[in-house]
Image (spheres, helix red, strand yellow):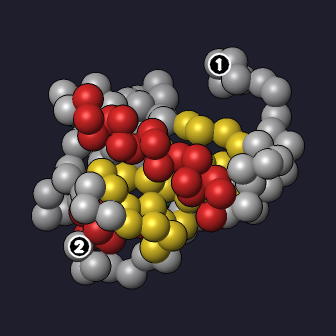
């Protein structure tokens, strides 16, 4: 998608700090990190969100990349949180599927509705 910022990062058309890449997935640092570790994992191919008819094999590859990133970022022992914001209520702002890997500090417990 020509106007998608993550497609541009994947295509090296805009800079991103790449943490890992292979034929199907790319992981890069979030531009506005919420925690000491905040890395995004995306499929190279554009899908809007996790419900966008993604082949099961690709979904498996994306999630198999999570522990790999955790290890690269040094949070595999301490733990981390994996987040996939989806749609409006999920507060998805970039509409190219991405997995957030967050770590390096103790997470808030609360996961309920916004105040
Ligand atoms: P969402 O709210 O859609 O789940 O998360 C989008 C994430 O993408 C946010 O955490 C935001 O900081 C990050 N982001 C937005 N634009 C850019 C960008 O141009 N480059 C990078 N590396 N991250 C971005
Ligand atoms: Zn895209």
**Which residue is labeled 2 in the image?**
11
Q: Position of residue 105 (x, y in %)?
A: 84, 51
Residue at the image point whose x is 57% and y is 56% from the top: 69
The residue labelled by disc 1 is: 113
Local packing at callout 2 (Cα closer than 10 Å; few below 14, some 14-19, many 20+) is few
Q: Quadrant of the N terminus?
A: bottom left
Residue 85 in the image: state x and y as whole percent. Answer: 48, 35
Instruction: State the image quarter where residue 92 is shown.
Output: top left
Numbered marks: total: 2
**Element under label 1?**
loop
| Residue drawn at x 26%, y 29% as measured from the top left | 56
Which residue is found at the position 32% from the left and 64% from the top?
22
Image height check: is 41 above or below 30? above
- In the displayed structure, 24 sits above or below 50; it is below
Disc 1 CB within 8 Å of nearest ligand 1 atom: no
| Marks 2,1: beta carbons within 8 A | no
The C terminus sits in image quarter: top right
Q: Which percent across, then down, holds residue 49?
A: 31, 36
The furthest residue to the right: 106
Name the residue located 64 percent from the left edge and 53 percent from the top edge. Answer: 70
Inspect this view and state whether residue 52 appears: no
Q: Camera-side residue: 56 or 35?
A: 56
Work out how far the residue at label 2 is from the one at label 1, CA to CA, in angstroms: 36 Å
């Amino acid at each position: 998608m020509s106007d998608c910022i993550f497609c541009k990062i994947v295509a090296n058309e805009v800079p991103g700090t790449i943490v890992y890449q292979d034929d199907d997935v790319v992981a890069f640092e979030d531009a506005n990190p919420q925690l000491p570790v905040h890395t995004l994992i995306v499929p190279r191919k554009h899908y809007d969100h996790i419900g966008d008819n993604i082949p099961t094999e690709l979904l498996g590859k994306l999630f198999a990349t999570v522990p790999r990133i955790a290890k690269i970022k040094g949070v595999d022992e301490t733990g981390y949180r994996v987040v996939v914001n989806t749609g409006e209520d999920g507060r998805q702002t970039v509409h190219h599927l991405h997995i957030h890997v967050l770590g390096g500090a103790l997470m808030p417990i609360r996961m309920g509705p916004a105040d």
